[in-house]
Image (cartoon, rainbow, N blue to C red):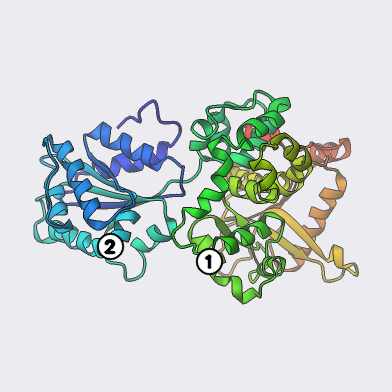
Amino acid sequence: MVKPAYIFDRDWEWQALTEFATGTQPEVAFGVVSGRRRQGKTFLLRALAEELGGFYFEATEGTDIELLRLFGMTLGQHTGSPVGLPFADWRDALTFMFSLPGERPMPLIIDEFPYLMKANPALPSILKQEIDLRGRTHRGTSQARLLICGSALSVMGKVLSGQAPLRGRARLELVVQPLPFRAADEFWELEDPRLAAMVHAIAGGTPAYRHEFVASDTPRSLEDFDAWVVRSVLDRRRPLFREGRYLLAEEADIRDPALYHSVLAAIAEGNHTWGRIAGHIGYKSSDITHPLRVLEDCGLVVKERDAFQSNATCYRIAEPIIAFYQAIMRPEWAALTTGHAAQVWERARGRFSSAIMGPHFETLCREYASRYGDDLFGPVGEVAAGTVTDPGSRDKKERKIQIDVAVLSPAFAGEPRKVRSLGEAKWGKVMGLRHLDRLRQARDLLEVKGYDTSETVLACYGGAGFDEELTAAARSDARVLLVDLPTLYGSTVSR
């Protein structure tokens, strides 16, 4: 089925939903849709229901009796009943809902399913029994294509895991991710790649922020960026102003917001390891195990493995607006809430470049390598940051070489791991031969450690460009790759 013209991007998500909703199997099919808040899940599901004449119900917070009543009212409206349908319980309601599809498959969508689970924890078990009844005992009695959806990732992650009642029943598990950075640039209609990267460092790929949260205001040029931040991001009257706080407050599993804000602030300020996070907030390492796990489950923090040290991990904030809030807004919250946005941004511009843009540019470069690496480097199995240790160095500062973008081939037993590319990313500094020399040193050290570096591409990702010596070196060596901002956001590669 052709995707409606009003849906931007989301081609494969729409294909997955429509293939599921129109599948020809003669029994009930069950699917789960999840994703962080504001990614457009509800927009997609409403469109699916409208295009296929399906049923859509969005739950709210409330008691079990109230939600059952609302469900009955929505079903009544869908079937043309002048009044709501009075169901005795959820089993009665689900039985009626599954009877809706006639001779053709029909999507039946329950959005914000975690609210229903909270009000009635037995609902997944009831749903499982109803699915099994029509999928096995009474096969062919319903062609319902049931989709449940939720933004509470910690809750939705448990729907199909372990001993959960619905485990093994889903034919679709769709996670709606933020827009890729190039698609986000197109969505924001930004022509300057540097401006696109800076806007992405605040709004990320979250579609809702483009119109609803900033009143469709976009920076008109790179010169307008500072004014845009003041009038649309730091303005206390705009919805985006409190978004960094609300995203945390909306997570049901977070019961001590102060601790979680402190953990996020520690990460935003450059403390990415377990020990450094704990030390920054004055806790023992063992005391932050639970908050870090909850933040991971909620999709607000990502735990990433070091590409070359299997026992080393680091934590990164997954949502750019939260990183921006923690590093820029939270320390100045009193001044911002009293209307001093311009003064705060004047003080914070330097911190934005170092604490936000530097790390975010590295993340963009890793996404670039992950999405386009097969064409650039060969088959990609993993893209991550990594640390290469030089045991022969007497200088402790030079003993560890940080690799911002390490691209490895798929791992095959009995074969040395191929290093497809080693990359360094610099947002605010012009890159030169010294950066290339560090990558060469890291490549040679990895060869000694048993990695296959025979085809390793050394990549410099430069937000501020490259000097003449590095540019000349890239022209003369096919194994040196230069990626500037136009290349990152375009289709050509500079060598």
Give left or right: position of 47 versus 85: right
Where does the image place residue 19, in percent across and percent down from the top left? 29, 42
Which residue is under mark 2? 166
Structural distance between the alpha carbons of marks 2 and 1 = 23 Å
SS label for mark 1: helix
The image quadrant where one finds the C terminus is: top right
Task: Indicate the position of residue 217 as horizontal and vertical percent values.
Answer: 57, 27
Q: What residue type is labelled 1?
A: Arg
Callout 2: SS:
loop
**In front of the other: label 2 or label 1?**
1
Q: Can residue 462 be seen in this view?
A: no
Q: Classify 10 Å Cα crowding around label 1: few (below 14), some (14-19), many (20 and above).
A: some
Q: How crowded is mark 2: few (under 14 residues within 10 Å), some or many (20 or more)?
A: many
- The residue lying toward the viewer, choosing from 409 and 96, is 96
Which residue is the site of mark 1? Answer: 293
Locate residue 263: give its quadrant. Answer: bottom right
> How many numbered callouts?
2
Q: Where is residue 252 in the image (x, y as percent from the top left)?
A: 44, 59
The residue that appears at 66% across and 57% down in the rendered structure is 265
